[in-house]
C-alpha cells in the first residue's frame, strides 16, 4: 500500500469515531426528548384541534396518525396519502408524522401544494383558504403519496429579544395563533421565555433578597429582554404582582400547547445577571459591576448591572435553583436550556483556561438540576465581538462542556456565517439560522438565494456539524415571503429554484395566478429580496430615524440609509402590482403586499427629498430647501394615510394591546409608556441628548408617522429654514431641546389612536403611485 493510501486510511480511521460520536450524541438527545413526549393520542388530538381552528369545514376530510421514527428511516418526516375508506362522507387524505408538528407541517404542505392555499401571520395579510376545494372534492395524490423527511432534526424559532419587540403584549388568544403558525411551518424547537420573572422572584427570595431589590432588577414589560441579558435594570419597571402572575399562567398555557403539538420548548437558564442587593447579602462573592450599556448619563437607577462570575460557587447554586424551580412549576418538559453569559459581555481576560472554566461552570449549574441538560447558546458573540473571540478562545468555550451537551445558533448565517470560518464551530453541533430583522422594523428586505441554498450547502459541506435550521429575527410580522421560504428549508435537502418557487408562492398567497403579479415578484426577487452587500439591514429611513446632526457640519450626503437595489426597478414592480386583475383586490394578502410595497417605494423617495433639502441648505438655496422640505413632509402625511387604510399598520393596535393587559389605571399608564417608549426614544435621554437607541425599534405605523415622526420633521425643518433665512448657524441644541421635550411628553401621553382601518387601500395605493410616479 502506498504512503498516500495509508495516510488517507489513517485520516478516515481518525475522523470516523468523531462523526459517529456526533451522530450518537445527537441521537441520544433526541431519544431523551422523545421519552418526554406526550402520547400519540394527545398529539393527534392537538393536530385535529389545530385543523378545526384553521379550517373547520374540513375537520372530517383529514385523518391524522402518529408513526414511529422507523417509518421515516430513523428520523422525522411526514407522509401524505389518499385515505382508503368505504364511507362516502369520511376522510379523504391521510397525513402521518413522527409528531404532531410533522402532521401539521404535512397538512400545510398538502394545502399549499395540492390546494393552492397560504398561511401567514394575521399582521401580514393572514390566510388564503378560498382556493381549497369543498369537502369531498379534495385533490388526490398519485400512487402511494409523498414522504417528506427533515434533513436535520431541529427547526429553531425566536430570538431572545423577540419576546419584547413582538410578543410582549400578547394574550393567550394571540399566542394560540402563533403556536398554530409555528406548527404549520414545522417549528419544533421554540424558545419559551414568557413568565420567567416569576421563577426568579421565588429563587431570589430563597437567597434572602427583598421585593424592593427585585423591583429595581426587572425591567418594564417592553424591556424585559435586556434586563434578562444584564444590559439594564429597572427601566420601565417595576413589575406588578398582577403582571408576574399573569405571565406565569400564560407560560404554562404556552408550554402545554407546545408539548401537545410535539415541540421541544427551550427554557431559560442562569447567565450570571443578579440584583445589586446580592452584593450586600454575599459580600465575598465574585460579583462585578458591568459598564455602561447605551445609557446617556449612566444613571445608576437603570444603568450598569451586576454579573456573578461563573467561577464563584454561588453561581452554580443559583443556576441549579432556577432550573429546579422551573421544573417544579412546569414539570419535566425539556432538556434544552438557553444561556448567553457572554453576549455583549466580554470576559475580563482572553486566557483560554479561564474561559474554559467559565463555560464549565455555566454548564455545571444546568446539569446539577437536570442531568441530561443541553446548553443552547447564541453564536452572535463570535460575530459581534470577533476581535476577542479568536479561534483559541472559541475552542476554549465550545469545548468547555462534554461533547453533545452544547448546541450553537449560527445566528447570522444568512449574511455572516460563522460555520465556514470556524471549522464548523470546532466540532460543536450548530443550527443554521436566519437573523434577517432588527428591532421589529418594517422594511421589505431579504436574501432569498442565501436562504434557498445556504442550509443545503452547510449540511453538504465536509465534516458538517449542522443539526438544524432556525429563524432568529428580533421582530416578526413582516416579509412573509422570507419566512415562508425559510420555514420550508426545514424539509428541503435540495436547493430551491426561487424564481419558480415564487410563482407558486404568489399564486397561493393571492389565490389566483396573474401575469402582472409574476412579473412584479420577479423584479422583487432580483432587487429587494437580493441583498448581497453583506450589510446587516436595519431600517434607518429618514422618516423613521431622522438624523440628529448639524447639517452645516461635515456629513457624507452620498451615504443615505441602506439601499441595495435600483429604486426605479422597484417602482416598476409597484406599477405592475397596482395593475393586477380586479379579482385580486379583495384579497387581504394582496392588499397587505400592495400597501407594504407602496410604503417601501415612498419611504425611499422621502430619503431622496431629505438629502436634497439638506444639500439646498448647505448651498444656501432657500427656494430649493423649502421645496424639498415640504415634499418630505407631504410624503409623511401621504404614507400615514396609506398605512391607515390597512389594519396591519396601525399604532393604535400596539397601544391598545398593551393597555388591555392592565388590571388597574396605574398599570395601564405604565404599560402604555412602555409601548410608546420602545418604538421611539427606547432608553434614557437628557434635555439635549437623545437616547443612543432612539428609533432602534422604529415602525412604519399610521399614527406614529402623523403623531410623532411628522412633528419631529416639522420642528427640524423649521430650525433649518430659520437658520437659512437669518443667515446664522443651525441651532442644534435648541432643536434637540424642543424635540426631546416633545418626545418625552408624547411617551407619557395617552391620546387614542385608531384601531380600525380607514379608506380603500387599493385606491389610495394607486392614487399615490400616480401622484409621484406616473
Image (cartoon, rainbow, N blue to C red):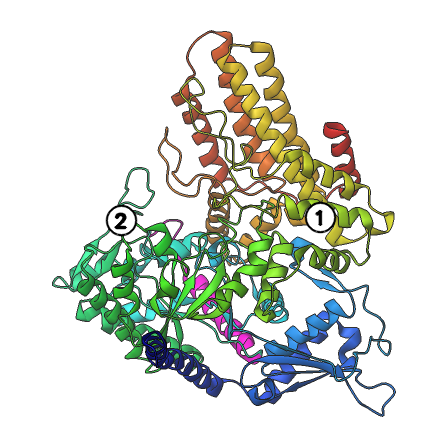
Coordinates of residue 9 in the picture (x, y in percent): 36, 79
For label 1, the SS is helix
Q: Which mark is residue 74?
A: none
Query: Is residue 250 one of those drawn in magenta?
Result: yes
Observer-nearest of 150 and 339: 150
Identify the image quadrant of residue 218.
Answer: bottom left
Observer-nearest of 268 and 330: 268
Identify the image quadrant of residue 496.
Answer: bottom right
Q: Magenta residues, as a range?
A: 233-260
Residue 41 in sight here: yes
Residue at label 2?
304
For label 2, the SS is loop
Q: Residue at x 85, y 85 (%)?
A: 89
Query: Is residue 107 one of those drawn in magenta?
Result: no
Coordinates of residue 424 in the picture (x, y in percent): 39, 65
Q: Quadrant of the C terminus?
A: top right
Left or right, 68 with respect to 267, comes to: right
Residue at label 1?
522
Q: Residue at x 40, y 49 (%)?
A: 236
Amino acid at each position: 500500500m502506498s504512503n498516500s493510501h495509508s495516510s488517507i486510511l489513517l485520516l478516515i480511521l481518525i475522523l470516523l469515531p468523531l462523526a459517529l460520536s456526533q451522530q450518537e450524541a445527537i441521537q441520544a438527545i433526541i431519544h431523551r426528548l422523545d421519552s418526554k413526549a406526550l402520547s400519540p393520542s394527545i398529539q393527534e388530538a392537538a393536530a385535529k384541534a389545530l385543523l378545526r381552528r384553521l379550517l373547520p369545514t374540513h375537520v372530517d376530510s383529514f385523518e391524522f396518525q402518529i408513526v414511529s421514527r422507523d417509518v421515516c428511516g430513523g428520523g422525522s418526516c411526514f407522509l401524505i396519502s389518499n385515505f382508503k375508506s368505504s364511507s362516502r362522507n369520511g376522510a379523504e387524505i391521510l397525513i402521518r408524522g413522527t409528531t404532531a408538528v410533522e402532521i401539521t407541517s404535512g397538512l400545510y404542505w398538502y394545502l399549499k401544494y395540492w390546494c393552492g392555499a397560504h398561511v401567514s401571520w394575521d399582521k401580514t395579510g393572514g390566510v388564503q383558504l378560498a382556493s381549497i376545494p369543498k369537502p369531498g372534492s379534495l385533490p388526490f395524490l398519485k400512487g402511494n403519496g409523498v414522504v417528506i423527511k427533515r434533513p436535520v432534526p431541529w427547526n429553531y424559532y425566536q430570538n431572545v429579544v423577540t419576546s419584547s419587540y413582538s410578543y410582549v403584549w400578547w394574550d393567550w388568544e394571540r399566542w394560540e395563533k402563533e403556536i398554530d403558525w409555528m406548527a404549520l411551518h414545522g417549528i419544533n424547537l421554540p424558545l419559551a421565555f414568557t413568565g420567567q420573572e416569576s421563577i426568579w422572584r421565588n429563587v431570589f427570595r430563597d437567597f434572602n433578597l427583598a421585593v424592593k431589590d427585585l423591583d429595581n432588577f426587572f425591567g418594564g414589560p417592553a424591556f424585559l429582554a435586556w434586563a434578562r441579558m444584564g444590559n439594564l435594570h429597572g427601566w420601565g419597571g417595576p413589575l406588578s404582582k398582577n403582571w408576574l402572575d399573569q405571565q406565569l399562567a400564560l407560560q404554562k398555557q404556552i408550554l402545554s400547547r407546545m408539548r401537545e403539538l410535539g415541540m421541544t420548548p427551550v427554557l431559560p437558564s442562569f447567565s450570571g445577571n443578579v440584583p445589586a442587593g446580592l452584593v450586600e447579602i454575599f459580600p465575598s462573592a465574585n460579583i462585578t459591576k458591568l459598564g455602561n450599556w447605551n445609557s446617556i448619563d449612566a444613571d445608576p437607577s437603570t444603568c450598569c448591572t451586576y454579573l456573578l462570575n461563573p467561577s464563584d460557587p454561588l453561581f452554580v447554586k443559583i443556576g441549579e435553583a432556577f432550573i429546579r424551580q422551573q421544573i417544579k412549576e412546569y414539570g419535566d418538559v425539556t432538556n434544552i436550556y438557553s444561556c448567553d453569559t457572554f453576549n455583549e459581555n466580554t470576559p475580563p481576560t482572553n486566557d483560554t483556561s479561564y474561559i474554559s472554566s467559565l463555560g464549565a461552570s455555566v454548564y455545571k449549574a444546568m446539569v446539577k438540576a437536570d442531568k441530561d441538560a443541553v446548553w443552547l447558546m447564541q453564536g452572535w458573540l463570535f460575530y459581534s465581538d470577533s476581535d476577542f473571540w479568536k479561534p483559541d478562545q472559541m475552542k476554549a468555550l465550545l469545548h468547555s462542556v462534554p461533547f453533545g451537551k452544547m448546541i450553537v445558533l449560527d445566528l447570522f448565517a444568512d449574511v455572516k456565517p460563522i460555520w465556514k470560518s470556524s471549522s464548523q464551530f470546532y466540532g460543536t453541533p450548530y443550527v443554521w439560522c436566519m437573523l434577517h430583522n432588527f428591532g421589529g422594523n418594517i422594511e421589505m428586505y431579504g436574501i432569498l438565494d442565501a436562504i434557498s441554498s445556504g442550509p443545503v450547502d452547510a449540511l453538504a459541506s465536509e465534516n458538517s456539524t449542522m443539526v438544524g435550521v432556525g429563524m432568529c429575527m428580533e421582530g416578526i410580522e413582516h416579509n412573509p415571503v422570507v419566512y415562508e421560504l425559510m420555514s420550508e428549508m426545514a424539509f428541503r435537502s435540495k436547493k430551491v429554484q426561487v424564481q419558480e418557487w415564487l410563482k407558486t408562492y404568489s399564486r397561493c398567497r393571492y389565490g389566483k395566478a396573474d401575469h402582472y403579479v409574476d412579473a412584479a415578484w420577479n423584479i422583487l426577487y432580483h432587487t429587494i429580496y437580493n441583498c448581497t452587500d453583506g450589510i446587516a439591514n436595519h431600517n434607518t429611513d429618514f422618516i423613521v430615524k431622522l438624523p440628529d446632526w448639524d447639517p452645516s457640519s461635515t456629513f457624507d450626503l452620498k451615504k443615505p440609509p441602506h439601499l441595495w437595489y435600483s429604486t426605479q426597478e422597484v417602482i416598476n414592480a409597484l406599477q405592475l402590482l397596482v395593475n393586477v386583475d380586479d379579482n385580486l383586490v379583495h384579497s387581504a394578502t394582496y392588499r397587505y403586499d400592495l400597501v407594504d410595497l407602496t410604503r417601501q417605494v415612498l419611504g425611499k423617495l422621502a430619503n431622496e427629498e431629505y438629502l436634497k433639502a439638506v444639500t439646498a441648505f448647505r448651498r444656501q438655496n432657500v427656494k430649493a430647501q423649502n421645496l424639498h422640505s415640504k415634499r418630505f413632509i407631504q410624503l409623511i402625511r401621504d404614507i400615514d394615510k396609506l398605512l391607515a387604510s390597512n389594519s396591519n399598520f396601525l399604532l393604535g393596535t400596539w397601544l391598545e394591546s398593551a393597555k388591555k393587559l392592565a388590571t388597574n389605571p396605574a398599570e395601564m399608564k405604565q404599560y402604555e409608556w412602555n409601548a410608546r417608549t420602545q418604538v421611539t426614544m427606547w432608553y434614557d435621554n437628557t434635555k439635549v441628548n437623545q437616547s443612543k437607541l432612539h428609533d432602534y425599534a422604529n415602525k412604519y405605523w399610521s399614527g406614529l408617522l402623523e403623531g410623532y415622526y411628522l412633528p419631529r420633521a416639522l420642528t427640524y425643518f423649521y430650525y433649518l429654514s430659520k437658520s437659512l433665512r437669518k443667515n446664522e448657524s443651525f441651532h442644534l441644541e435648541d432643536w434637540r431641546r424642543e424635540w426631546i421635550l416633545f418626545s418625552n411628553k408624547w411617551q407619557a401621553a395617552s391620546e387614542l389612536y385608531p384601531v380600525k382601518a380607514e379608506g380603500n387601500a387599493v385606491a389610495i395605493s394607486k392614487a399615490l403611485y400616480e401622484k409621484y410616479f406616473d
